[in-house]
Amino acid sequence: RKEEFSIPQSSKVGDFHLLAPKSCPVGFLRLVTAEGLQLVDPAESLVAYGVQDGDHLTAIVLEAKPQAEEAFALWCYGGDNILTWGNPEFGGDNSQVQDQLRRVQQLQATGRAFAAILWDGQVVTWGRAAYGGDSSQVRNQLQAVRQLQATESAFAAIRADGSAVTWGDPDAGGDSTEIQEKLNGVQQLQATGRAFAAILADGDVVTWGSQSCGGDSSGVQLELRTVQQIQATGHAFAAILANGSVVTWGHPAYGGDSSKVREKLGKVRQIQATSGAFAAILTDGSVVTWGDPNYGGDSSAVRHQ
């Protein structure tokens, strides 16, 4: 389907909220430029995103369906409704907060709760309180939020000023008080099942949560410099450095120990993960794997393919 809009170039991304409902009944959708750049900040100008007269934008109609252990949530970027179903206690019933869900920007889930970022940067939560469904204790801090991440029972939010806010199960990353002063200039958050890792603006990394799931990175802290990307299994983290090398920590059986393939991990451009193993794509197109063989950590059978 193709639609043409006439809007001043000085307009902001949020101005599309006024136009989209006239042509699309499901509300404002995520917009992507021809170069693949997502127009995600409603307060940012079109000029700042490099949009020019005559440019073509693609609207993503549906986002992925985040799920808790026994509940699903289906939503549309910028919409005023999140459809939930499943176990009511695990987030399958959001009727108590439905009237607060306006222009949803992002949806994230723990095992038994959901959290949504609204267009103004506020956050709405529902589901089991112990799993992050109750954010009342940090409600005043949840302003200008731009990203959410989740472990199995806790949430972490990055705010526009680079600070981070956490809530939910304290043993799974919901309590960040001990390292809160270090959480400045946070650029990216990643999570295992029970721990978080934050990449800071200078490329350093801060971790918290369960030690057995990567919450303690003290053993490799001196190596965690100029970090570009972090991936996670359920129990371990893997970080790509600026020079293409990789640093891992967490449960050794689930990818936290990469010593057997360390010499091969020198020119890594991307890492993907299952719940128990990692796979790294090198610059020459080859793949290196490690972790639990039952989760893909052993690729010897297909190595020559």
Image (tube, rainbow, N blue to C red):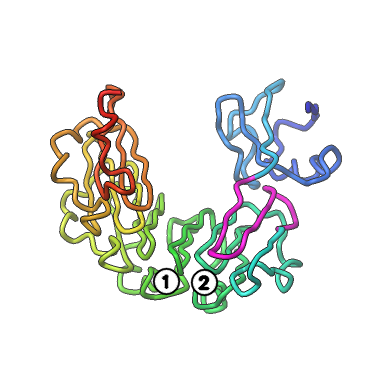
| Horizontal arrangement in the rendering, residue 244 relative to residue 186 (left or right) | left
Do the CB atoms of the residues marked 2 and 1 lie less than 8 Å apart?
yes
Residue 14 on image: x %, y %: 70, 45
Examine the residues drawn in magenta and state their main secondary structure.
loop
Q: Which amino acid does label 1 sit on?
A: Gly
Badge 1 marks a residue whose secondary structure is loop
* Above or below, 194 relative to 299: below
Locate residue 171: give its quadrant.
Answer: bottom left
Locate residue 34: give its quadrant.
Answer: top right
Where is the N terminus found, in terms of image quarters?
top right
Where is the C terminus found, in terms of image quarters?
top left
Badge 2 marks a residue whose secondary structure is loop
Residue 44 on image: x %, y %: 62, 43
Q: Mark 2 points at which residue?
A: 132
Residue 105 on image: x %, y %: 63, 52
Span colored in magenta: 63-82
* Above or below, 265 relative to 65: above
Q: Name the residue under label 1.
A: 174
| Residue 158 on the magenta span | no
Residue drawn 69% across and 61% down? 84
The alpha-carbon separation of the residues under discs 2 and 1 comes to: 8 Å
Check residue 50 in the rendering and tell me which mark sits there, or answer none: none
Q: What residue type is labelled 2?
A: Gly
